[in-house]
Amino acid sequence: MPTAEVEGSTATETAWLRPSNDKAPRLEAELTAFGFHYAAIRRPIVSPETQDYIRTTVFIAPFTVLIPPNDKYNLAQMLVPIDDENCMFYWVAWHPTAGITQDAWRRFCVAVPGVDLDADWRKVRNLSNNFLQDRAKMKAGDFTGIEGIPAQDMAMWESMGPIADRSEDHLGASDVAIVQFRRQMLAAAKAVAAGQPAIGTETGVRHTDLASYEGLTPKGVDWRAFTTRGAVRSQAAE
């Protein structure tokens, strides 16, 4: 995700360009009836005195996350538990009007069937081969040495083991969303054990109206205003 002088996250065949090189965003999170959402607020390259670069992520309980879009894709992740130690991972992309080119999307994710995925749709890059991590590329400047954003994410998840020992964690300011999520889900589990409704089942909110957001906004604009698709469309029109 290299930096460039663009209006917002801009997808090419090989990268997602971003209008900020700020590596220490200000994070803000808020609990909601549908789960929670949070924002990463960064200093943009263009007009940093008057603008913020905002990216929001939406957690829709119990297992859906809307991550910040770009100009080609809206993006969602779903991690659905299938037993006590494993989840099924769905990585979904769409565009509400233009559609997407499936082959280009699979190439970008390095998830081409028959090349990166076997006949059973299992990934070639996996924990048993260290996700084919290329140390030479890392020395040359590639941060992870692992091809494809999905494989990079899964490398982090799976390398922790089936059940991670969280007692050894030392969370900080950059982990605000992680802290919020853990607290919320532990409380939700205790509520169900006590006979109360499961999280997300009594929201009164239409999930199809919810949206993540990314873009340049005037300083002082509340990122919470972009929770719904209507608000995002209004901002885009302006």
Image (tube, rainbow, N blue to C red):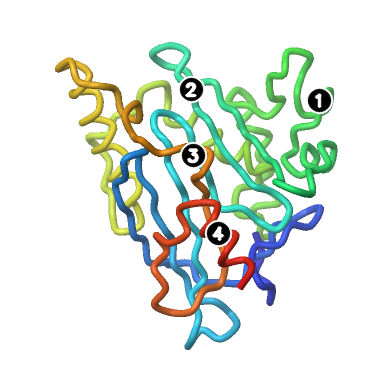
Q: Which residue is mark 1?
A: 113
Q: Amino acid at mark 2?
A: Val
Instruction: Determine whether label 2 and label 3 are within 8 Å by CB.
Output: no
Question: Nearer the N terminus, badge 2 or badge 3?
Answer: 3
The dot on residue 65 is 3
Disc 1 is placed on an element classified as: loop
The dot on residue 80 is 2
Q: Position of residue 110 (x, y in %)?
A: 75, 38
Mark closer to the observer (4, 1): 4
Quadrant including the C terminus: bottom right
Q: Amino acid at mark 3?
A: Val
**Label 1 packing within 10 angstroms: few (<14), some (14-19), many (20+):** some
Disc 4 is placed on an element classified as: helix
Q: Amino acid at mark 4?
A: Val
Q: Which residue is mark 4?
A: 232
Mark closer to the observer (4, 3): 4
Q: Position of residue 179 (x, y in %)?
A: 28, 45
- Identify the residue at image location x=68%, y=34%: 132
> Looking at the rendering, which quadrant does residue 107 occupy?
top right
- Distance between the Cα atoms at labels 2 and 3? 11 Å
Disc 3 is placed on an element classified as: strand
- Identify the residue at image location x=83%, y=27%: 115
**Label 3 packing within 10 angstroms: few (<14), some (14-19), many (20+):** many
Q: Amino acid at mark 1?
A: Pro
Q: Position of residue 128 (x, y in %)?
A: 60, 22
> Looking at the rendering, which quadrant does residue 124 occupy?
top right
- Identify the residue at image location x=38%, y=13%: 84
Question: Nearer the N terminus, badge 4 or badge 1?
Answer: 1
- Distance between the Cα atoms at labels 2 and 1? 22 Å
Disc 2 is placed on an element classified as: strand
- Distance between the Cα atoms at labels 4 and 3? 17 Å
